[in-house]
Image (spheres, helix red, strand yellow):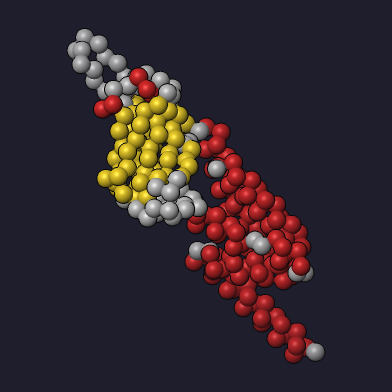
């Protein structure tokens, strides 16, 4: 899933760079350059996550039952997982070597109607944690469960609304894709001249941007209108 986002971001950045070359007004060039920098920052962050996948995080040592032996355990925050769905469940797949050998009380989930946490304790002297917040749809906590399989934990999140198809795992993933799709519509942009494409892009940037972005776009539009009035008077 991360690889798809990375490819989409790369395509967005390339498209913006093409429009930047075609833009003639400095304000428009500045706005396009700002958007390119923002997407490049997101691209780099996702690339780093994809490269590292699992990032070990040292936690406080966990005392053992034997007073004569001191063994450190470390917490590993999991970022990667797979998921699938049926009419009743969202199935989350987490790969962990030898997890089937752990006692059941060391593998458990903490669930709410819109989040899940998987805890795997003392697997080869490491504690593993996977957190997924802001699920796309609510789940039924009491009907959900999990299973230990060979080198894998499978979490069955029961859908509160059975037969509802989830397009994404989380709200954040869906919003991120919707925003990218609203920025660029390649078929429409191919039919327009460069200036129309830039104006359409600026409109989308204004609708989805923060306060600073909206202020810059409003200023550029206002100065453009004033220049048109001046040119008309000169004629």
Where 224 sits versus 7, above or below? Answer: below
Instruction: Please give left or right for residue 123 compared with residue 17 in the image.
Output: left
Give the residue drawn at x 31%, y 49%. Answer: 140
Where 107 sits versus 38, above or below? Answer: above
Give the residue drawn at x 26%, y 14%. Answer: 70
Where 218 sits versus 66, above or below? Answer: below
Q: Position of residue 36 (x, y in %)?
A: 63, 54
Give the residue drawn at x 70%, y 52%. Answer: 14
Image-quadrant location for residue 62: top left
The quarter in which the C terminus is drawn is: bottom right
| Identity of the residue furthest to the right in this view | 235
Image-quadrant location for residue 51: top right
Picture mark count = 0
Taking the image as drawn, is residue 117 in sight? yes
Q: Position of residue 73 (x, y in %)?
A: 33, 22
Q: Position of residue 132 (x, y in %)?
A: 39, 44
Q: Position of residue 177 (x, y in %)?
A: 55, 55
| Identity of the residue furthest to the top in this view | 68
In-front residue for pair 142/228: 142
Instruction: Please give left or right for residue 45 compared with residue 108 in the image.
Output: right
Taking the image as drawn, is residue 73 in sight? no
In-front residue for pair 157/224: 157
Where 49 sits versus 161, above or below? Answer: above
In-front residue for pair 163/18: 163
Instruction: Please give left or right for residue 166 compared with residue 36 in the image.
Output: left
Give the residue drawn at x 78%, y 88%. Answer: 234
Instruction: Please give left or right for residue 7 compared with residue 99 in the image.
Output: right
The quarter in which the N terminus is drawn is: top right
């Amino acid at each position: 899933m991360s690889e798809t986002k990375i490819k989409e971001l790369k395509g967005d950045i390339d498209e913006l760079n093409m429009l930047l070359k075609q833009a003639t007004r400095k304000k428009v060039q500045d706005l396009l350059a700002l958007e390119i920098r923002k997407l490049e920052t997101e691209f780099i962050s996702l690339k780093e996550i994809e490269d590292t996948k699992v990032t070990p995080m040292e936690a406080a040592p966990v005392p053992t039952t034997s007073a004569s032996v001191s063994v450190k355990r470390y917490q590993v925050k999991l970022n990667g997982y797979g998921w699938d769905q049926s009419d009743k469940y969202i199935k989350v797949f987490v790969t962990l070597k030898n997890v089937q050998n752990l006692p059941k009380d060391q593998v458990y989930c903490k669930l709410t109607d819109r989040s899940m946490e998987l805890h795997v304790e003392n697997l080869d002297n490491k504690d593993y944690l996977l957190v997924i917040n802001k699920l796309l749809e609510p789940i039924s906590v009491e009907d959900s469960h999990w299973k230990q399989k060979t080198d894998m934990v499978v979490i069955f999140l029961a859908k509160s609304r059975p037969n509802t198809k989830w397009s994404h795992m989380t709200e954040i993933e869906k919003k991120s894709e919707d925003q990218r799709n609203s920025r660029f519509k390649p078929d429409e942009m191919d039919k327009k001249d460069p200036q129309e494409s830039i104006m359409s892009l600026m409109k989308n940037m204004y609708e989805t941007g923060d306060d600073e972005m909206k202020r810059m776009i409003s200023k550029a539009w206002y100065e453009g209108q004033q220049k048109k009035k001046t040119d008309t008077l000169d004629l």
